[in-house]
Each structure stands twice: as structure tokens, then as C-alpha cells.
Image: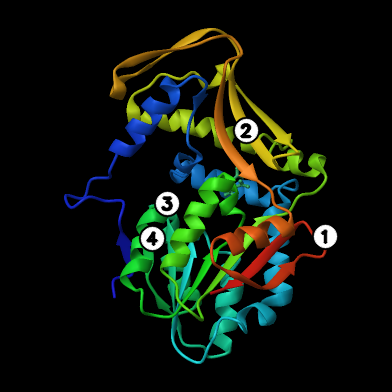
């Protein structure tokens, strides 16, 4: 087995850039303007997201960490069904939380291989290195790619037993209708006995949610602005980052955190790769990200709609976050 499969690289080794160029052209040419949060995670973006996870305001990671630390036994006893299984971690990142489960599975001598998938090549390289040092006996197959490429991996291994992890409120970036499409897709590659562990951020006091995405140190602002920097660097644009301001707002009916970058004055930005000059009016906003929050009822319904049964719900002591174990 290769330690790392890079699906983001084309046969000649170059990184597929067309989707990025096209999405930027479409999003910034659109009225209202938007960019896709999937492009946040270049190496600077991945580093900034790690800093976000350590912020006092960003409760999500700590809450899920607590769930795994305290309830690892209860969680992992659902995984094994007597034989070998693939543990597929979609959007694994640094896998800090998954490592708690991995250590436990290893100590219980369970037969599995670990398949972390992430769009960040840097993150997968680092994870491969750290796992080889920390858990040398474990079978490992890291995949660099988009979620849909990971789904192809699932498809190719259709007949084998699987436990899919989709943790850390990564599903929050999808709208409810996109979530249904995505989970149905996952479901179509699973069979009876397979599992999905889904980490969702629960609805709570809007002030708590808002401050998680509008931190005092300004790391979330830098995380958003980094996408403009990435467009400057990779697509030859001339965004002046000082002229954009991060704005985060929570919509309690939809349960969605939305973040924007707002142009503080009228300005023009040239993007070489698409050969276009874009106009920004004073106070015009670029929509950057959605982070959906769920009630437990909603997650269970979502699972049911997509062909899953809710087996168990694991929550942290503050009831901020939930990991839902679905079975097929
Ligand atoms: C990685 C999608 C779970 O929405 O909470 C953190 C990304 N954005 N702060 C989230 C994010 C701003 C994060 N997810």
C-alpha cells in the first residue's frame, strides 16, 4: 500500500487549478458575490484553522474532544462487527480527535485500516508522519482529495466493511439540501452493518455561536482574508487585504452562521488568471462561509431521510456538540 494517494494531482504532477479559477470567476462575477469555503485550506489556511481550534471562543473542537475522551469505549464498541473494517475519516485534518479513537481501537486489538481523507496535502503528509511515529503498527492509507474523490474510493471498496467518520461539524458547510445529497451518496456506498459517525454543532445561545466565529484575537478574520491572499498568489490578483473587513452573523431560524468579507470602500481588483477587473462598491459583501447548526431532532431526521438509523447519540457535558452514530 502507498502511504499517500494524491487525487488532487493530475498525471503530470501538476495541481488541478481549473476548478479554483472557475469557481472564483463564477463567485466574484455573481451578484451578490461569494467564494467557496472549500478553498480556505491551503497551507496557511490549514495552519490558521489549527489556531482557530485552539481559540477560547471556538468550543466545537474541545467539545468533540471531550466526547471522544470520555466515551471512546461506548463509541468504538459499535464499530467492530467481528472482522476487518475500513475506518474512513472525511476531512481528517490533523486528526487530533480521531487519534483518541485510533489508540483505543488499537489497544482493543481491532482489525482495521485507517483512511484519512483531506484536501490539504500538507495536513495529510504531517498526519502520515505523526501516525507512523505514534502508532507504528496501524495500517494507514492517507488520501489527498475532495470529498467526492473520497466517495469514489468508497465506491471502489464497496464490498468491504466500513465505518465512515464525518466529524468536527464539517457537514455544517453544506446547506440542508446539499447535506441530503452528500449523505445519500455516502449511504449508497455502504451496506448493512456499516456505520457513519457524524459530528454536528448543536443549536445553542446565539452569543456563544457568534463569538466562536468572531474571535477577539482576529484569527477567524485572518482565516477568511487568507482566501483573498491565496487568490492574489495563485491567480495573480491584487486584493488589498486592508480594505476588507470580516463580518460574522448568526441566523437563528435557519441555524446558520454566515461570514462575509466587506469592502470598506469602492475599489477595483484585477485578477490576471481570469483576465478581469472586478468592481466592489463601498460596503459590498463577499459571502465566504456557512456553518449550519442542528437540533438533535433535525440530525435524526436528516439521517432517516438519507437511509440511516440513529443508533446512539453522544454529547459533551455542556450539550454543545453531538456525535451521532448512524447504522445502515
Ligand atoms: C471546519 C467547517 C467545521 O464551520 O466551524 C471555523 C470552519 N470557519 N471558523 C466551522 C471554520 C470559521 C469550521 N469547519
Q: Which residue is mark 2?
A: 259
Q: Which residue is mark 3?
A: 120
Give residue 105's position: percent from left, percent from top: 56, 83
Mark 2 or mark 3: whose residue is earlier in sequence: 3
The answer to whether residue 232 is seen in the rendering is no
Badge 2: few (under 14), some or many (20 or more) residues near its Cα, within 10 Å?
Answer: many
CA separation in Å, label 1 and label 2 = 25 Å
Give residue 200's position: percent from left, percent from top: 65, 57
Q: Quadrant of residue 305?
A: bottom right
What secondary structure is found at the residue carrying circle 1? Answer: loop
Q: Residue at x 63, y 61 (%)?
A: 199
Mark 1 or mark 2: whose residue is earlier in sequence: 2
Of circles 4 and 3, the one toward us is 4
What secondary structure is found at the residue carrying circle 2? Answer: strand
Q: Which residue is mark 1?
A: 318
Q: Nearer the viewer, residue 188 or 252?
A: 188
The answer to whether residue 137 is above or below residue 223 is below
What secondary structure is found at the residue carrying circle 3? Answer: loop
CA separation in Å, label 3 and label 1 = 31 Å
Is ligand 1 within 8 Å of the beta carbon of the residue shown at mark 2? yes
Badge 4: few (under 14), some or many (20 or more) residues near its Cα, within 10 Å?
Answer: many
Of circles 2 and 3, the one toward us is 2
Q: Residue at x 45, y 20 (%)?
A: 239
Q: Is residue 120 left or right of residue 95?
A: left
Is the residue under label 1 in contact with that under label 3 (CB below 8 Å)? Answer: no
Is the residue under label 4 in contact with that under label 1 (CB below 8 Å)? Answer: no
Mark 1 or mark 4: whose residue is earlier in sequence: 4
What secondary structure is found at the residue carrying circle 4? Answer: helix
Of circles 3 and 1, the one toward us is 1
Question: In the image, which disc is placed on residue 150?
Answer: 4
Q: Residue at x 34, y 67 (%)?
A: 155
The answer to whether residue 304 is seen in the rendering is yes
Amino acid at each position: 500500500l502507498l502511504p499517500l494517494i494524491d487525487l488532487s494531482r493530475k498525471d503530470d504532477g501538476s495541481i488541478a487549478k481549473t476548478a479554483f479559477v472557475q469557481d472564483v470567476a463564477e463567485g466574484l462575477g455573481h451578484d451578490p458575490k461569494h467564494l467557496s469555503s472549500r478553498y480556505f485550506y491551503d497551507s496557511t489556511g490549514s495552519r490558521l484553522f489549527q489556531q482557530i481550534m485552539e481559540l477560547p471562543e471556538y468550543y466545537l473542537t474541545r467539545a468533540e474532544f471531550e466526547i471522544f475522551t470520555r466515551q471512546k469505549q461506548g463509541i468504538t464498541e459499535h464499530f467492530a462487527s467481528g472482522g476487518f473494517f475500513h475506518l474512513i475519516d472525511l476531512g481528517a485534518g490533523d486528526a487530533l480527535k480521531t487519534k483518541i479513537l485510533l489508540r483505543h481501537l488499537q489497544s482493543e486489538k481491532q482489525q482495521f485500516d485507517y483512511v484519512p481523507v483531506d484536501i490539504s496535502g500538507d495536513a495529510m503528509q504531517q498526519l502520515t508522519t505523526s501516525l507512523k511515529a505514534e502508532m507504528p503498527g496501524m495500517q494507514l492509507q492517507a488520501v489527498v482529495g475532495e470529498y467526492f474523490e473520497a466517495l469514489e474510493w468508497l465506491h471502489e471498496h464497496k464490498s468491504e466493511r466500513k465505518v465512515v467518520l464525518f466529524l468536527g461539524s464539517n457537514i455544517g458547510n453544506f446547506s440542508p439540501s446539499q447535506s441530503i445529497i452528500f449523505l445519500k451518496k455516502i449511504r449508497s456506498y455502504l451496506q448493512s452493518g456499516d456505520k457513519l459517525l457524524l459530528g454536528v454543532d448543536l443549536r445553542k445561545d446565539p452569543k456563544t455561536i457568534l463569538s466562536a466565529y468572531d474571535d477577539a484575537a482576529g484569527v477567524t478574520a485572518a482565516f477568511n482574508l487568507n482566501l483573498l491572499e491565496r487568490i492574489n498568489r495563485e491567480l495573480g490578483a491584487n486584493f488589498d487585504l486592508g480594505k476588507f473587513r470580516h463580518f460574522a452573523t448568526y441566523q437563528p431560524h435557519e441555524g446558520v452562521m454566515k461570514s462575509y468579507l466587506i469592502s470598506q470602500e469602492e475599489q477595483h481588483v484585477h485578477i490576471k488568471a481570469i483576465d478581469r477587473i472586478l468592481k466592489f462598491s463601498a460596503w459590498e459583501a463577499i459571502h465566504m462561509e456557512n456553518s449550519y447548526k442542528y437540533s438533535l431532532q433535525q440530525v435524526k431526521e436528516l439521517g432517516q431521510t438519507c437511509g440511516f438509523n440513529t443508533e446512539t447519540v453522544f454529547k459533551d457535558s455542556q450539550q454543545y456538540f453531538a456525535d451521532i452514530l448512524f447504522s445502515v
